[in-house]
Image (tube, grey):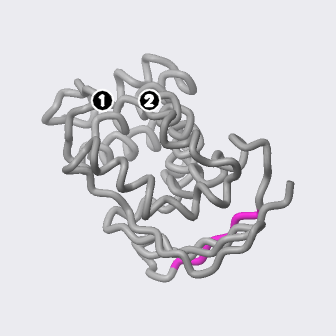
Amino acid sequence: MKGIVFTEFLEMVEAKFGLEVVDSIIEKSDLPSEGIYTSVGTYSFNEMVSLITHLSDEVKAPMGDLIYAFGLYLFNGLGKSHPEVIVNYNNPIDLLYAIEDHIHVHVKKLYPDAELPKFKILEKTDSSISMIYSSSRGLYRLAHGLIEKTFEHFNGKAKITFELLKEDGTEVKFDIIQNG
């Protein structure tokens, strides 16, 4: 998993819960990296699982809710780091439609070893999109937060529903209808 995800995650934890919580979850997680991340480094996904698990225990919040909150937070960090990806789009539906064929292609150029989720578009109109998220990591709640923040970025809102196609969250259908 790319380091930018770790650095953004720890920034979110500090902003929402304080530096003491950051230190605590790093200490409890017994990380091979010792919690020292660079945005361009690559780290084990298991480190993120450990950090999220300990954060959930520490702040008494469900892991899924924390992952979703991280998706909301991560959009802005990625947008600041790579504004060239977002500026090509005028609306959230077009940006979501381009995840697989443009955005992930761009990400792969920057980070050739990045393991990205797949998004298969099922249907698209000017105000709606249906797609299937697939990832062995099952971080569909992260995707949900990123999708919601995409609409906020364009000053819009959407009704976002999802259906687990596989119980472990590795394949999820999102139905998104823009309403503002």
Q: From the image, tell me which residue sits under label 2.
A: 81
Residue under the image location 58 percent in, 39 percent down: 87
Residue lying farthest to the top in this orientation: 19
Whether the magenta-drawn stretch holds residue 162 is answered as: yes
Q: From the image, tell me which residue sits under label 1.
A: 39
Residues in magenta, as a range: 159-164
> How far across and how far down the image is residue 161, in percent?
68, 69
Compared across the picture, whether 94 is left or right of 26 comes to right
Residue under the image location 40 percent in, 65 percent down: 138
Disc 2 or 1, which lies upstream in sequence?
1
In the figure, 9 relative to 158: above or below? above
Residue lying farthest to the front in this orientation: 88
- Which of discs 2 and 1 lies nearer the camera? The answer is 2
Magenta stretch: helix, strand or loop mostly: strand
> How far across and how far down the image is residue 32, in percent?
13, 35
Circles 2, 1 touching at the beta carbon (< 8 Å): yes
Q: Amino acid at mark 2?
A: Ser
Question: Which of 4 and 23 lies nearest the eye of the viewer?
Answer: 4
